[in-house]
Amino acid sequence: MIRLENIQRRYVSDEVETTALADINLHVEAGEFVAIMGPSGCGKSTLLNTLGTVDRPTGGKYLFGERDLAALDEKDLAKFRGWTLGFVFQSFNLIDELTIEENVALGLAYRSDAGDRKGRVAAAMDKVGIAHRARHFPHQLSGGQQQRAAIARAIVGDPKLILADEPTGNLDTANGEQVMNILGALNDDGATIVMVTHSPAHADMARRRIDMLDGRIVASAMRAM
Amino acid sequence: MNRFTLLSLYRSLVRHKLYAALNIGGLAVGIAVFLILGLYVRFETSYEKGLPDHDKTYVVQTTWTLANSPINGTFAWTMGGLLDQMREDFPGVVGTRINGGGNAGSILAGGRATPVDAAQVDANFFQIFRLPLVAGDAATALAQPGNAAIDEQTAHAYFGNRDPIGQTLVLSMDKVRTYRVAAVFRDLPKNTDLKLSVLVPLTREMGTENWYHWGSTNLQTYLRFDTPAAARAFEGKLTAFVDRRGKELADVGEKPSSVQQLSLLPLADLHLEPQGNDSSSAKTTVVTLGLVGVLTLLIAVVNYINLATARAGLRAREVAMRKVLGADRGTLVRQFLGEAVLTVAIAALGGLILAELGLPLVNAAGGLSLTLPYEVVVPALVMLTAVVGVLAGVYPAILLSRFPAASVLASARSPGGGRAGTRIRELLVIGQFGLAIAFMIGTAVLVAQTRHVRATDVGFQREALIVLQSTADSAVPKDRLPSILTSLRALPQVKDVTVSNAAAGGSGDYNSDNVPLPGVAGPGPSLKWELVSPRFFETHGTRLLAGRWFGDAYGKDDVYSLDQSKGFNIVINRRALSTLGFASPEAAIGKTVGGDRPRTIVGVVENMRFDTPRKALPPTYYLYYRLPEKIGTSVTTIRTTGDPRSAMRAVQALWQRMMPQVPFNAKTADERLADFYEADDRATRLFGIGAGLAVLIGCVGLWGLASFNTQRRVKEIGIRKTLGASSLDIVKLLVGQFLRPVLIANLVAWPLAFFAMRTWLAGFEDAIPLSPLFFAGATAVALLVAVLTVLGQSLRASRAAPAWALRHD
């Protein structure tokens, strides 16, 4: 489903050139659950952002299915994200002024196909067990609940790919477990997930683990089922 | 804009109530100030524009350019017979005349005289001033000498529900005469200087002896032209006309047109056009207050943009999230513009409400009667909302939609527009506070000058002085004057009584002539002269600088009984000393000036300022008439023993007993002089209100910005404290950061205020010096306000525990 060929990402400031990604080659099949690990600054988040099209590579090719994403302009990329991707962040990134229900519905806000929005929002909230908090505001919820709401927002549009950037980084062990269980269940239902994590235990829940160092993939291993 | 955008805007406003109140409230106040001052400017510039064909009507102006004359200047008055001579020389010229208007007559009914806005006009008046008639025929209304046209209000007051046509009314104007009402016209609008309620035909018999005397100005002449070009073409012929017709003017100059010119002024320009040698206070006031309105709005808009952009940074995360969810830049720009327009719309509505609530106060402070014309205000506000909304929304919209989503979402901190954003905000604060400080300086100078004018020595004792103008009414038989004066003197509340042709408050005649100096060629300087009768200086409490008062014991004092070519005595004022070339008051005593009418100076008195402080005080000499009834325009001045109000009641009772057919017209000198200060006082009050609110809005902006910056620097504060900074260090850091733009703002404010105030003060003869204290004071106030504004927040931030601050994002 995803094919990265020789992806590079360089940041150029006044005097220093930093290579965040160097010749990344990666294939992700539909239905896979991939965990990316590595020390801070190794390029994990940059890789995830590149997959999520919120960061553009400075070289290489990014094919999503048959589509070459390098050929899309900003507007089409925005549309692509809205229709195809779901994001989960370490710091939840819920909008403070909207209720949980409204935050989840925001996942459909920039799409024209939404159909039964209410039903889809309710279903998404049900799936992550947050329906009873629908009318609350983010600051009224625990971290774990907020992250579950963020996952509901990510899945409400049935994305082809879910990108999770350290989804358990801000959570305690129990809440972290809960979130990982939800992601696992989603994957069992067929969702494709790419997740950045620092936790080996959580990485072990993925089917494939990729280790990065200095902007390169240094190891890629399938978990024995 | 989708539903969530609206929802999130609404909740954001509700959640950050203080921010919303400051942001929207500040803008609403700015809009209200702009609206009210805009209404004021609109009203002041709308004069005569409600009259039909005002754009085709021109008033003939007379301009005097005599050598050193106190009467030089342009006046909207002409000689009575000017129009007759114009018709002879320019067949086809269409014009009409108005003599009087504004309390110039009185209606006698039931044994009482009531002042009325009466005027004598030409029979063709309604052909030039096409006032809508309620009854009667415009062509014939004033065709008969005994006809009158009255307005609806007068018709209602005197005839109730009866048909006024054919009714009679007795009008005293020069003479007492009965008129038959032949037409009723609609009441004139408020925004007109034509104060006309009763119109009667103008006849030569009623005119003055100066009807064809070039050099006299005694009524107003209006001409009608279909196009401005036709008016200009006609104006071009007037110099030759003056030279041809005004031969008598050549007495004082070589060519008549070198001392007097005629010009045309569009009717609508008359209201704000300065008359004579007045400095143009009306125009300056209107322009200044209009500017205050625009600048206050500008400050409020800047404020809004400043707060909006500062706050926008805090929303970076939301924007990034929306981008990730599929919103493109266009959608986001539209969202932010929409939000801004919506917020400004709320502020506009608030501004409208504030304006409606504040209008009665402003009307009271400014002596105005403004109302909000919704048919104008609503479209104007809609336009304003669109413009300000886009202005205020475009920068944050573009700024925010540009944030790189990936880095914003990954980092704990929100971008605030970077260094450029901070720079821009600082510049905006400088501009805003610069204007606010300039406003403060302006208000201080205005208040100081108006106070100074009120308190300044007018050269006579203005307290406990009553000016009774009724004795100058032509309806008072001259032979009754002595008995009136005797009765007035007999009142226990009256200490002294005198009669003159000019009195405190500027009423009466204004005459001047040239006084040839011995041994100096030419006609000599032009001096104002006033006719006074016994006890004039004593009644006024004037200070004698040298010589003596007038007195009946001196044979050469009573000018009326003398052959002027054989010489007579005069008293001069201090200003005349230098005009006539004397080094000191003593040096003038006993000297004779005046050529073929030799005038010997027997006294020098302090300058008496009867007129507006905006007019140059003229060099004046006084002539003495032993018999007050011989003075043509005989205004009476009364010195009372105690409270002038009780004296006023006694004088009124006496007047109504002796002269019931003549309206009682009297005011204290204080009241009459106050009328001169009133316009400036009002302008000062309006300016003060506008400026005060502008300063307030500026402070609101500073407060908002300070709170935003402090919030953004919480982590920095934590780090500094961990490294050993004390709370005081932190307060110093934060307050210092805000004092810098406020200090720089002074560089903007000082020159601005200096030039503006110098120009304004130039309009006063007796102006206060532009002391540096005004500038230093305003700066001190601005600094104090700025420190107080940011101090509270800085203190709170400085006290925060470092551990909490470090965790804060």
Image (cartoon, coloured by chain):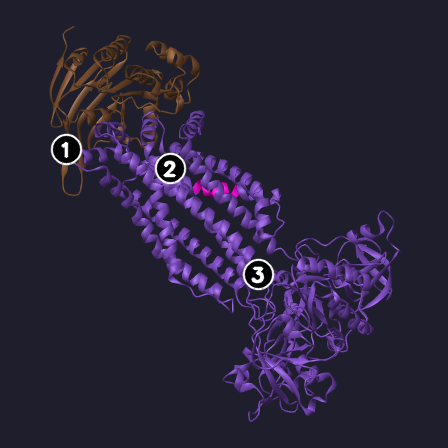
Q: Say whether residue B62 is visible.
A: no
B158 or A2: nearer the eye?
B158
Mark 3 neighbour density, 10 Å: few (under 14) some (14–19) many (20 or more): some
- Is B585 situated above or below B83? below
Q: Colour of chain B?
A: purple
Q: Are marks 2 and 1 in contact (CB under 8 Å)?
A: no
Which-is-in-front pick, marks 3 and 2?
3
What amino acid is found at the position of numbered circle 2 in the picture? Ala
Quarter of the rendering containing residue B575: bottom right
Nearest to the observer: residue B714 or residue B322: B714
Chain coloured brown: A
- Give coordinates of residue B644: x percent, y percent: 66, 60
Q: Which residue is mark 2?
A: B397
- Viewer-side label of 1, 3: 3
B220 horizontally vs B416: left or right: right
Find disc 3 in the rendering and name its residue: B677
Q: Which residue extends farthest front? A: B492
Name the magenta segment's main secondary structure.
helix
Q: Amino acid at mark 1?
A: Thr
Mark-to-mark CA distance, 2 and 1: 31 Å
**Residue that extends furthest to the right in the rendered view of this protein:** B166
Q: Between marks 1 and 3, how big is the CA–CA gap?
A: 76 Å
Q: Secondary structure at mark 1?
A: strand
